[in-house]
Image: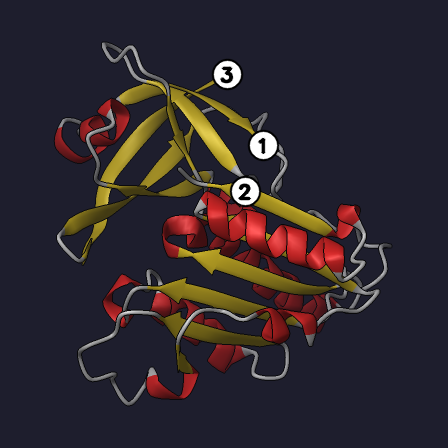
């Protein structure tokens, strides 16, 4: 386990009546693997419950700045309460990195297309993969010798546009790489008017099987993260469409 110093409160936003806060962690240890990882567990002094949160930053942020970013939703869970209400600059916790929900291509691997399917706060690890994909595109354009990724399509569902976390970050990447990165925001209970900037990307209703089925190919990997019923539904749907199990990766949040 690594010991890390906390840099809290870099940004704050609200999801309905629920507050979310992004936190960045400056690493003191250099042994963490250069990956987009599903989650980290951290052990807070004085808190008996282990915290588990998804990484939403790219591996290059870790390599360049020795920082990882976690989006921590406010909840009654003791570690979340501590992050929001008790942590201070340079608070220290013990951190353990793990999980199998990541995209870690090697330079000689064949190009892959990615379909990312997110529900609610399930966007966190998928944002990490999306940011990593953008870094790979930049590296390939600049150096021409790094991994050549295919296209990336994000399907992201929430109750309304105010609950679409990181939407500006996502659209910034879509605008930067219009031929490589695309997104489709789905809202299920939208009542307010949708902004002009978001409207071209928003669909009323849930993500459908047909939308996902239209992107199935031998070169495509699928990543699903959201509520358990959603992840179960899409992983089973993909299997029924004869997508190899090794091309389907999912992470459930509870």
Looking at the image, is mark 3 or mark 2 earlier in the sequence? 3
Q: Which residue is mark 2?
A: 251
Alpha-carbon neighbours of circle 1 within 10 Å: few (<14), some, or many (≥20)?
few
Determine the secondary structure under disc 1.
loop
Residue 186 vs residue 129: left or right?
Answer: left
Determine the secondary structure under disc 2.
strand
Determine the secondary structure under disc 3.
loop
Residue 124 vs residue 190: left or right?
Answer: right
Q: Are marks 2 and 1 in contact (CB under 8 Å)?
A: yes
- Above/below status of 209 relative to 92: below
Residue 231 vs residue 16: left or right?
Answer: right
Q: Are marks 3 and 2 in contact (CB under 8 Å)?
A: no
Which residue is at 27% across, 36% downward? Answer: 7
Looking at the image, is mark 2 or mark 1 earlier in the sequence? 1
Q: CA distance from mark 3 to mark 2?
A: 22 Å
Q: Are marks 1 and 3 in contact (CB under 8 Å)?
A: no
Q: CA distance from mark 1 to mark 3?
A: 14 Å
Looking at the image, is mark 1 or mark 3 earlier in the sequence? 3
Which residue is at 63% across, 64% downward? Answer: 115
Which residue is at 57% across, 61% downward? Answer: 116
Q: Which residue is mark 3?
A: 1
Residue 99: which numbered mark, if any? 1
Q: Which is more toward the observer, 194 or 85?
A: 194
Q: Please tell me in which quadrant of the rendered image residue 134 appears.
A: bottom right
Which residue is at 43% across, 47% downward? Answer: 227
- Above/below status of 65 relative to 219: above
């Amino acid at each position: 386990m690594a010991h890390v110093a906390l840099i809290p409160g870099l940004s704050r936003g609200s999801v309905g009546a629920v507050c979310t806060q992004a936190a960045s962690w400056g690493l003191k240890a250099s042994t963490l693997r250069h990956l987009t990882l599903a989650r980290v567990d951290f052990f807070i002094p004085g808190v008996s419950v282990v915290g588990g949160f998804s990484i939403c930053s790219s591996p290059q942020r870790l390599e360049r700045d020795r920082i990882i970013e976690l989006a921590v939703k406010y909840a009654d869970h003791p570690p979340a309460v501590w992050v929001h209400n008790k942590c201070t600059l340079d608070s220290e916790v013990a951190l353990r990195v793990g999980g199998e929900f990541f995209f870690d291509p090697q330079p000689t691997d064949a190009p892959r297309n990615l379909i990312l399917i997110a529900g609610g706060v399930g966007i966190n690890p998928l944002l990490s993969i999306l940011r990593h994909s953008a870094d790979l595109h930049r590296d390939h354009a600049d150096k021409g010798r790094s991994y050549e990724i295919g296209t990336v399509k994000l399907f992201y569902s929430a109750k309304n546009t105010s609950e679409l976390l990181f939407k500006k970050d996502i659209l910034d990447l879509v605008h930067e790489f219009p031929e490589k990165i695309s997104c489709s925001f789905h809202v299920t209970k939208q009542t307010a008017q949708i902004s002009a900037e978001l409207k071209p990307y928003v669909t009323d209703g849930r993500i459908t099987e047909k939308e996902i089925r239209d992107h199935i190919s031998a070169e495509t990997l699928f990543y699903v993260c959201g509520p358990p019923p959603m992840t179960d539904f899409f992983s089973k749907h993909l299997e029924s469409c004869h997508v190899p199990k090794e091309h389907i990766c999912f992470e459930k949040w509870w």
